[in-house]
Image (cartoon, grey):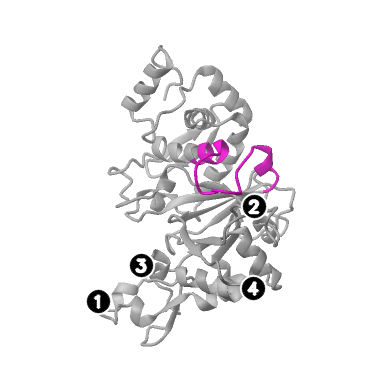
Amino acid sequence: MPPHEPAGDAPELIDYYFEQGWTDGLPVVPPTPELVAAMVAALGGAPAHLEARIPPRWGNLTREVLAINLVLAGCRPEYGPVARAALLALTSSHFNLHGVQATTHMAAPLVVVNGPIRKDIGLNAGANVFGSGCRANATIGRAIRLVLLNVGGAWPGDLDKSTLGHPGKYTFCIAENEEASPWPPYHVEHGYARGDSTVFCIAAEGPHSVTNHVANDAEGILDSIASAMSTIAHNNAVSSGSCAVVIGPEHAATIAGKGWTREDVQRYLWEKAGNSWDAVSFGDRYGKIYNRNLPDWYPREAGARIPVVPATNDIHLFVAGGPAGRFSAFLPGWGHMTSPVLRAIDGRPPANAKDCTDGTCEL
């Protein structure tokens, strides 16, 4: 990926990059030597330094190659460390990026950022948090996708076998709205200090909207979220694993106003969200092998309850979104084939580190 070929004006370069197959289907910023050099400097210099290898093609992500893709995506230099931390997290063995890249499922890596860096670089944690309009969110997520394409080789129909995909495969990066949250930030709940900045990564479907404009108690709102979680059509129902729940600030205020903690919410959702064995197994219509991906300890008998995820801490809970609107969202995961990961921007593990390898913690 040469940073400055061919010589010409921007429109010619943009067309050239389309012809080379170096884009995500949208125009890119030509990575001139000056822009790439500034990005490499923001990443710490040493352009030949190998940051990671990206499956399924296992291409070498050197610092210069990362810088080129960051520029292509439209990132500012100060965004670089966030994208790098996310890519280092995604390439940990826990996450199984090879599987996420090549699966026929629609899962895409979602990145949730916590800590002071959110404000330092202007990440959006508020209104339209999953939507357009914020350069930091859009271009960091896009840079990650460009690396997965250009370095990992996961081109749709080639090594990326996703049947449908979803829009998060363009960009899928948000920040937690710590200021609007009645609970400690997600990374603090997992042992980091408030002054640390982190990225959380999970392979997920797009957000499934949860609407509840009537409940003035925690149970009513959470029953709506549990209802969204309780279907047999997403991967958690048949493959277990982890999921994400994003609670809007209005819903969060109502829930916390009744004295509920984050752990209370996770426990309630785990207890209420689920399906019957009869539904998940289609009444054993396809034989027992059909549900072989569910944990062995799940009861496989008529009338038994099958939880959406194995444990309360497999529901990864965040507060995000704008101040108006009683909405939340459920994001199903890919199943047991992947594990979410958490990593500090600077790579330091939390003070109470456990199950952490090379700075990335399995959750």
Judging by the rendered image, the residue that carries numbered circle 4 is 264
Helix, strand, or loop for circle 4? Answer: helix
- Queried whether the magenta region covers residue 47, the answer comes back as no
**Quadrant (top left, top right, bottom left, bottom right) of the N terminus:** top left
Instruction: In the rendered structure, find residue 177 and report the number of the disc placed on it.
Output: 2
Residue at mark 1:
286
Gap in angstroms between the C-alphas marked 1 and 4: 37 Å
Tell me the magenta residue range: 115-141
Residue 14 percent across, percent down from the top left: 39, 22
- Which residue in the structure is indicated by mark 3? 233
> Which numbered disc, 3 or 1, marks the residue that appears first in the sequence?
3
Q: Looking at this view, name the residue that lies furthest to the front.
A: 214
- Determine the CA span between mark 3 and mark 1: 16 Å
Q: Is residue 156 left or right of residue 124?
A: left
Asked whether disc 1 touches disc 2, contact meaning CB atoms under 8 Å apart, the reply is no
Q: Which one is earlier in the sequence, the residue at label 1 or at label 4?
A: 4
Task: For marks 2 and 3, give the CA distance.
Answer: 30 Å
Residue at 47% from the left image edge and 38% from the top image edge? 142
Q: Is residue 272 left or right of residue 57?
A: right
- Can see residue 346? no
Residue 110 is labelled as none
Q: Answer with mark 4 or mark 2, whichever residue precedes in sequence.
A: 2
Closer to the chain start, of discs 2 and 3, is 2
Amino acid of disc 1: Tyr
Secondary structure beneath disc 2? loop
Q: For the residue labelled by badge 1, is the local secondary structure a helix, a strand or a loop? A: loop
Q: Is residue 130 magenta?
A: yes
Residue sitting at 68 percent across and 72 percent down? Answer: 260
Secondary structure beneath label 3:
loop
